[in-house]
Structure formats: structure tokens, C-alpha cells
Amino acid sequence: MAVNRETLDTLLEENRIFYPDKEFVARANVNDRAIYDEARADTQGFWAKQAENLDWFQKWDRVLDWDNPPFAKWFVNGKINACYNCVDRHVLTSRRTKPAIIFEGEPGDIRTLTYEELQREVMRFANVLKGLGVSRGDRVAIYMPMIPELAIAMLACARLGAPHSIVFGGFSPESLRDRINDAAAKLLITADGGWRRGKIVPLKHNADDAVAECPSIESVVVVRRTGQEVPMIEGRDYWYHELMERAAAECPCEETDSEDMLFILYTSGTTGKPKGVVHTTGGYLVGTSTTHRIIFDHKEDDIYWCTADIGWITGHSYVIYGPLANGATTLMFEGAPDWPQQDRFWDIIERHKVTVFYTAPTAIRAFMKWGRKWPEQHDLSSLRLLGTVGEPINPEAWIWYYKNIGGGRCPIVDTWWQTETGQIMISPLPGITPLKPGSATVPFPGINIDVVDKQGNSVELGKGGYLVIKEPWPAMLRTIYGDDQRFIDQYWSHFGDRWWYFAGDGVRRDYDNYHWILGRVDDVINVSGHRLSTMEVESALVDHQAVAEAAVIGKSHEIKGQAISAFVTLKEHVWQEIRNGDMDRKELQKALKAHVVKKIGAIARPEDVFFTAELPKTRSGKIMRRLLRDVAEGRALGDTTTLADPAVIAKLKAQYEGKES
Ligand code: WT7
């Protein structure tokens, strides 16, 4: 094999090990390896001990009920309220006047909410919700920018025991509509708009389009953020600030059950239909607060910043619930990292004296590209710990992050987990684990992960296989909303009657038992740390009048990790028009990209669209995406023996390489 200088460097760096610094170890929340043995010896006891850090109205009488797998119950019959644990209990302590949320808007507006102020806002808004008929068990949809009212809204829902369903503000009206309808939400909370690189994201406008086709929605609450004119429908739409003025100040917390639904969060699966991942209350809070405390080594005076949008699971677990349950100061930022300049993040870290910083590899690769000069202009000495999540981090990016952001003194926690796991599952403990750039290292204490082959046999060290979780964990998803069967089929049916959770990721375990995530093994693409299903994008393409058939794959991308490549077969008359010159090929490619954005959202925009007369299929008619991946990556074709017509792929490859399309 020819090894160029670059890959050689990577190989060398992969072998580098970074040991925790003595001073960091001395101060670390956990610095004794015994935690792993303790948790292994008595896993339920370990989680029960962690649960003692939360306030329960009534203690559980059983830690785990796994009598009816895969339906787990954690902290059975415990009564607990998530909002009480994230807000009220801190108001009773010296944290009363501590900032709970530091908010910075894209235009530069800053707002700090102490725990006491947060409680005041949340109680009022909970009364607003009640006044609009929301009660325990009702689903509330939220479609908002990253502003404090988003945190207030979700905590108010938790206070009442009304599950929230947050839809990322970058999703299209149609995506919002489908999610609202799947959950039959009663109320929608949105904003007039949000700021994104100096422009307004028209949230209310999108919400109106969605709600027109959502029979379950009774009212829409609108936060004024950008201030532009938006139509308000009499009897359905209400301004947040007007309702808040009239709302009563006091509102008690519901004594919700440990297993009451806290929220639904939609994610992409292998089919086109989004999955409503259901998380409940007690176990989720135990899982997220424990991992936040131990992995991010939470200290009372930390200024903690997780850059994820709350519309994703990372935002739910590590902007809001985990940190606030621990009484942390959590920073919320509305905007983009390159607005107004490419140093916005470093500027924020310097001004707010951020100590712990958690972001995604895709962002780090963008920072690398923009260059060292941006962080160099700022004092980043407040930082003491860094984290990453969302996709494998390439060792070069790890080293860059370590040197240029962490100043060579901050451990990096590379955390593997999923929307479904709710909490971090594989990660270093910063006071214990030697770090290897590119590896998420080892399972968290109390988490039983294995790497197995198709038959379920553990693979030897040094080999790759499927990532499975062999025992339940507190923040695990409980089901897919309204679809228990899909929950069973998707996650629990891969290894016969052994109730193992199948994560959908491939992983290699090295000789030190370190885990190297290899990526998805199913038809799921990871774009910028977010999952998209190939099917979802294909349905959006086929929805366009010019398209006969489409196949979508993930292709390596310098910044995004993976980018979407679409292979499209056009309807015969469209081919004709192109041949006659009545239609422009490039214009059509543009139109198809725009169509996907309209159907799903900007994250799903294909990087390239390639027209082909035929797609490679098996004799039974299944599209072989694997071969399309080989073509797109410029690799030699893999096994083609199952193809109905091998000539199709050969021709396609030649055309693609000549970029005839
Ligand atoms: C998928 C989950 C929950 C975090 C945000 C994404 C990939 C996540 C890592 C990591 C390698 C990672 C996996 C996983 N992934 N973290 N540290 N190293 N891969 O949440 O949208 O539910 O996606 O992201 O493929 O299955 P998600």
C-alpha cells in the first residue's frame, strides 16, 4: 500500500496517548478507577446511588423492572418532577442567585437568568399553558430559535407533566407538520423568527403553513424575537409576552411518575417516516445528570457551554436537563460560529469565561479550515475541559482542537451516544482515562457495551463488529411514540431472543479495549453530526415531478463528515426536454436540491445530484447503494455478483468519473 505523508502522520498520531494531567486528576470529581468495578459488581446499586443526587417526592421501590423486555421501567413508582430538579430545588440553596442560563443572541444581546429568575418565568409560563388547556399528558410542540423562552417553555411543560416535542428550527413546514400530527400535539410554541447570519428564519410563517394541516393544534403561542410583522390568527394565536403579563406567579410542580413521558424527540431511521423517540422522567434525569457531573467534571463555578441546538438530543440532555439538574450555569447561543466573523465562538468563550466547551467534529473541521488566526486573537485560558459529539473525530481535528483551543492543557472527552440512548454511553472520564485521538475510549461505568458479529459472538480485540448494549440503562428510550412494534423491530430483534439493543453503528475495539466508532451500518447518513435517512431524502426527490427514481448515499465530506449524493433517474419526457435543450440540466439539479430543502430542511440539501439512465439493482429490484457509494468515493467496485445487470454500474461509473451528467 502506498502511504503518503498525510496518512502516515495520521497513523502516527493515532498511536499517541494523552495522559490526564496531575493537577486535573487531583481535582477531578472522579479519579478512582474503582468506579468501574463498583458499577460492574452492582449496576443497579450504582444507578440507585446516582439517583440519590436528585430530589424525589417519593422514593422508588424497585430500581429496574426488566420483566417485560424491551420495555424497561426505571425507579419504579418513584415520584419526581424534572423541572423541580432543574430549577426549584436550587432556589432553596445558595444557588438562588447563581446564573442558571447565560444567553447570547446572534445580534449580541445578552441576558442572564438566575435560578430564581428562571423559576419565576417558568411558573408564569406553566400557568399560561394551563390557561390554554394544557394538562398532564398533553403533548406540546415547540419550534423555536435558541432563546431563553425555549428553555422556559420546555421546563414549564416538564413542570406540568406535559411532554414536549421540540422540532429543530431548521426543519421545513412539512417536517414540522408531520411531527405535530404524529404526536397529536395540542399546542405549538414558536417565535416570530430567529436570527441566522443576519437574516431572519421565518418561524411563524413556517408554523402557519404547518398548522394549517394540523387538526390537533388548538392554540399557538408566539414569542416576539425579531420583531417583524407576522399575521396572528384571532382565537388561535397569542403573543407570549401578553399572556405572561396576565399569568399568575405561583405554580406548583406536578408529582409526576418516574416513568411518565418527559418528551418525544423525532429522529431519522432507515425508513422515510420519522421516529418519535420517547424518553421518560426519572431514569433520563439520573442518566443525564450523572454523566454531566462525571464526564464534564462539573464544578460549582463552571461556565459550561454546549453549542448544540436544543432541537437535537444533545441540547435536551446537555444544554438543559443534565446541567440544570446539577445546578450548573449553562450558556445558550442563538447564532452561527462565523457571524459576524469566524471568531464568534472564541469571542464568546473569552467574554463569558467559559470553562467547559462541548461541540461537534464538523464545527472543529470548519474552525481548522478558517485557521488558527481566529482563536489566537482571543484569551481562551478560562477553558479547562473540551468535548465532542456527533460523529467520529478524525485525529488531525482532535489534535488541532487540543492544541489550538485547549492550549494543550484541556482533556478532550469524545462522547458516543444517540438520540435513543438519551445519555452519553462511551466516553473517557477526564480524571482517569488516557486519551487516544479519534477514539471515544471506553463505556461509562454501569454501561454494558459489546462488539459482536452477525451471530452475536463477541469479536476479538483488534476486530470490528456491531455495537450492542447488553443491559438496560437509565436514560434509554422507552419506545417509539405510538409504535411499539417498530421499537422492537428496529432495536431489539437483531440477536434472536437475547434482549440486546442494536445501535446501528459499526465499531472496532483495539488491543487496549478502546472503542473506535466506524459509522452507521444501515441506510442512515450522518451529516454534520445529525442523522438523516437515505429514504427520507429519496422520498423528497421522488416527490418532484421530474424524478422517476432516486438513490441517495453519504459521501465523505471535508467539513460535514458526510454529504448527501443523489443519483436520480428522470422521467422520460424530462430526458427528452434536456436532450432538446428545452430544459437546463444545471437548473434542474438546482431545483431538485431546493425541493429537498423545502420538503425536509436545509440540513438535507444534497451536495450533488447526478442524473443517470438506470440505477444498479439486484435481481429482486433492490437498489444497491453500496455500489453507488463505491462510485461516489472513487473506489473499486465491491461485489457485483448479485446485480441484475452489471453493465449498468460499469456505465454509471464511467459517466460519473467523466462527470458527463
Ligand atoms: C449517531 C447518533 C447524541 C449525539 C448527537 C447525534 C454518531 C454520535 C459519536 C462519537 C462517533 C458518533 C453515531 C450514532 N455518533 N457520537 N462520539 N463518535 N460517532 O445524535 O442524531 O441520534 O446520532 O451519531 O453514528 O449512532 P443522533
Image (cartoon, rainbow, N blue to C red):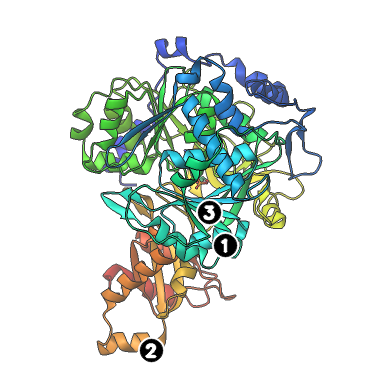
* Separation of marks 2 and 1 at Cα, in angstroms: 30 Å
Asked whether 626 or 34 is in front, the reply is 34
Where residue 502 appears, as percent x and y from the top left, is 63, 47
Asked which quadrant contains residue 254, the reply is: top right
In front: mark 3 or mark 1?
A: 3
Quarter of the image with the C terminus in it = bottom left
- Find the distance from the CA under tag 3 to the CA under tag 2: 43 Å
Q: Secondary structure at mark 3?
A: strand
Q: Is residue 30 visible?
A: yes
Q: Earlier in the sequence, mark 3 or mark 1?
A: 3
Q: Quadrant of residue 348?
A: top left
**C-alpha separation, residue under disc 3 versus residue under disc 1:** 21 Å
User: Where residue 269 sits in the image (x, y, percent)?
Assistant: 56, 56
User: Does 290 sit above or below residue 454?
Assistant: above
Residue wearing tag 2 = 573
- Badge 3 local density, few (<14 within 10 Å), some, or many (20+)? many
Do the residues under discs 3 and 1 have CB atoms within 8 angstroms? no
Total residue callouts: 3
**With respect to residue 517, does 642 lie above or below?**
below
> Which amino acid, mark 3?
Leu
Quick one: label 1, few (<14), some, or many (20+) residues within 10 Å?
some
Horizontal and vertical percent position of residue 323: 50, 28
Mark 1 highlights which residue?
273
Residue position for label 3 = 188
Ranked by sequence position, the earlier of labels 2 and 1 is: 1
Looking at the image, is mark 3 or mark 2 nearer the viewer?
Answer: 3
What residue do we see at 24% from left, 87% from top?
581
- Dot 2: within a 10 Å radius of its alpha carbon, few (fewer than 14), some, or many (20 or more) residues? few
Q: Amino acid at mark 1?
A: Lys
Q: Position of residue 341 (x, y in %)?
A: 21, 41
Q: Which mark is residue 24?
A: none
Disc 2 marks a residue whose amino acid type is His
